[in-house]
Amino acid sequence: MNIKTKTMKSIFRIILFAALIFFNLTTSIKAQEKFRKSPPLPYPLPDLSMPSMKTSTLSNGLQISVIQKQQPFIDMHLIIMTGESLSPDHLPGMASLTANMLFKGAVGISASQVEEQIEYIGGDFSVRTYPDYTVFSISFLKGYLNEAVMLLGHLLTQPDFSKNEVNNVKRDMFYKIIRNTNPELLGRKLLFQIIFNNHPYEKYVFNSSVIKRLTRKDLLTFFDKFYRPNNSELLIIGDISHSSVIDISEKHFSLWPKKSLETYHINPPPEQMKPKICFSDVSDSEEATIFIGNILPYGDKEDYFSYLVFNQILGGSHISRLFMNLRETKGYAYWAFSNIELFKNCELFYVRAKVKPEHLYSSIQEILKETRYLIENKIPNHEIEQAKSYLIGHFPIKISDHKEFSFRIAEMIALDMKEIYWGDYYENIMYTNSNSVFNTFQKVNFLNPVVVVVGDKDVVLDYIKEFEEVEIFNNEGVFQYKLKKGTQNNSIL
Amino acid sequence: MNLKNILLFFLTLSLVLNGFPQIKKLEVQNPFSFSVYSLKNGLIVILSKDNSLPLATVVCAYKVGSAHEEKGKTGLAHLLENLMFMGSRNVGPMQHIRFIHRIGGEFNALTSWDHTLFYQTVPSNQLPLVLWLESDRMNSLNLNYAHVEETKNLLIELERTQEKENPFLESSREFDRLLYPKFHYSHPIIGSEEDLKSITLKDAKNFYNTFYKPNNAVLCITGDIDQEKTLNLIKKYFNTIDPSKKVPSPPSFEGDFKQERHEKIIMNQKISTPGFRLGYRINSPYSNDFYILTMIDYILLHGESSRLHKRLIERSKLALTLSGGIEKRIDLAVFKFFVLSNNEATKEIAKRSLLSEINKLKTSLISNRELTKVKNIFKADYIDSYYSPKKRALFLTRNYMSKIKIQDLAKELDKYLSVSSSEIVGIMNRYFTDYSILLEIKSR
């Protein structure tokens, strides 16, 4: 091989190599252009595994559920299976007063010492009363379980409910109600009041006038009757074994005596069969806040997931129909969403929206139109799939905070919904389809809802005069008068 | 140029265009494991795996905030934050938000004095989508006159709403002007209506082209991720985004941030109860003093059993509102109190009571029990601040952008927990002197 041939070969190799690099380079540029143009496909859906829960019962009937989970905190919830619906009929608010009193001291320990002891273990606490149950929650640093259970055991077994503290709590409850001028809270409250009219759940939305009737004596009776281990469940989530929890609980709850309990059965409330428009006056409110709701019958698992998918399509998020229609397309609303609230034997479905007063009437019509369309038609598959995708994606986000996760488990226990939440949430959503949603809503009478509007009557009332009849309430939910189409604003009928 | 050089040129060009491998800067194990990388274009990448839930959080943060704004252009940084949702070359206006919502994700954005960050939490299988979205707006934000004007109008409306709905905004801003004498630190992040109106498309473009670049950004991803796969995705979407030639350094405080005494009275017609704001200037938020002052903050103001809560609210009911604590802005820190009271007489007693609690901390040692309590509350708050994918991503990003050495992050908690009672007395006497800034708020 002569030198010339060798040189030629080298040149050829180099040109070939350079060409290859060029090819690589140009395809790379093209690839970049291409991948930026459209959104990438997702990876396969990862599994969601929920930690297992182990439940046992102490000799006094207290159920103890433990979820062993590696985390630096312990989330502890005591669930009393009694809520506001079992307050005496003449004393609505009694369940709330009793609950608010539990952390206000006990024999040998003042309210401020209780606060100090909880903060000493890096903790915080909350008390929530619902129509069906009451939950006391303490979240604290791991390593302090014994201290936390000991304190809770002491509060439950040695309460003193001092007169001073009862008066303080009653005063706080009173001012909380009368100072509440938040249109959203007032709207939800009035919706509850109308929908659960004459039903035990109505007691959940008591007003300030009942507070003075709540006495320490009645409180003691209520506590004695319902704050019993055999009417309670203790949930503990944290890096702690079931057996350690049982040992500690036996030690501190053994003095909490059980008592035979009457069985209370609360019938589901009837669905609203006739539409009703109510207005609550809140001065200085520049917008109109709307609540539109009705009862959903308590169904089976399939119904529950149909409700979820339906809710997501109608108003579950910022891309749902109501938000897109009322805010993005028509510009009537600042926001518009829908919600489902769970109870032991029914569900409450409602739409809530904040709208410009001049668009109040049209907004209500649009909400009813959207709802009617989804109930009366089979929802297109792409909307169902979109909603399912949202629900599947969003569920782990909702439980990513340890406190939120533990609250959901407490709710699940209180409402006996273990089957629905646990384990196969994704599968249940997946199985929901257009037919199942359609079939579920054929059993529902949602088209005669209660409509509640909250706003400043000087601003809003002109815009609701288009309705045949509107019931007017003050901001504590006390009925004032009926406004009929074509009459003066202040005519009391 | 000989053949070898030609070959070398092509090889280099190929590598540049295809992206160099990432440079791993460091790997840290505590308080949880994470790794830090730097791409060739200067983008800092932080990854932290936690596969307890099938989620991933992506934070994309830029080292620019309201402190970078010039006089007459306040609100520009916040405007840019909002314009980042108005579309880029391959993503339509507001589409970013819709993409995230459709998959059940959550997003938000935030502008502070020295950084602007965007974050989203999504199902972990949708990580490629988020990186596609973030890289597109880092690479090619679609800034036009209509978008700038529309967003300005929205923000002006927001400013007006805030002023209407928050009766304490005016006094809060006035107090900031007194506490932070330099404009860069004291002006409101949202900007003034007048300044917002004066911002032009050119201003927005200049700001974006200067600061929204990979060499001025931190990308942090936490959650259910595969490290290698994630790095490849990042390389794919971010490696070819051009850095800026030079990013201006953040303004630092020039001059003495010395303690001084100042008193001012303002009238607030929007409120029916009087109040006061009291503040103390502190030196660097990165000195040892800051850790001690944080514990003082917890002793006085954190929790129902804190000293001021007990004294001013629980026992005497002198305060209707009580808030405050230590606040840091870039390289400065202040300690603030805000009290609202029923009337002028109770306000004066509340002020005296507050000063008396300060004096107690100057003259007597805090008990071991109380110190343990505040340390436990702080510890719970500190751990909680990184205890979810979203919180962890924000925690890592903020710490990386601060002056804390990220490799020493594990030592941070101990610095707070090792504060002693005697150090508290010393610091109280050093900073809580007569050199305070007081703003009296008279009600209607």
Image: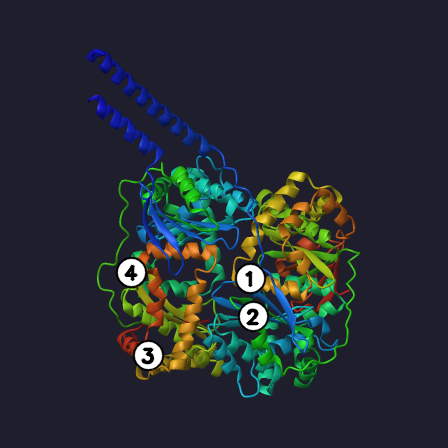
Q: Residue at x 55, y 42 (%)?
A: A44
Residue behind mark 3 = B421
How far apart marks 2 and 1 lie (CA) works out to: 12 Å
Residue behind mark 2 = A76
Q: Quadrant of residue A235?
A: bottom right
How far apart marks 3 and 1 lie (CA) works out to: 36 Å
Q: Mark 4: which amino acid? A: Asp
Do marks 3 and 1 share a chain?
no
> Which corner quadrant holds the C terminus of chain A?
bottom right
Q: Quadrant of residue B291?
A: bottom left
Is A267 situated left or right of B145 in this image? Answer: right
Q: Position of residue B304 (x, y in %)?
A: 48, 76
Q: Residue at x 26, y 70 (%)?
A: B259
Callout 4: SS: loop
Q: Quadrant of residue A95?
A: bottom right
Count of residue discs = 4
Which callout, 3 or 4, points at the residue further toward the start of the chain? Answer: 4
Q: Is residue B130 above or below residue A143?
A: above
Contact between marks 2 and 1 (CB within 8 A): the answer is no
How far apart marks 4 and 1 lie (CA) works out to: 35 Å
Residue behind mark 4 = B331
Q: Chain of mark 3?
A: B
Q: Which tag is nearer the camera, tag 4 or tag 1?
A: 1
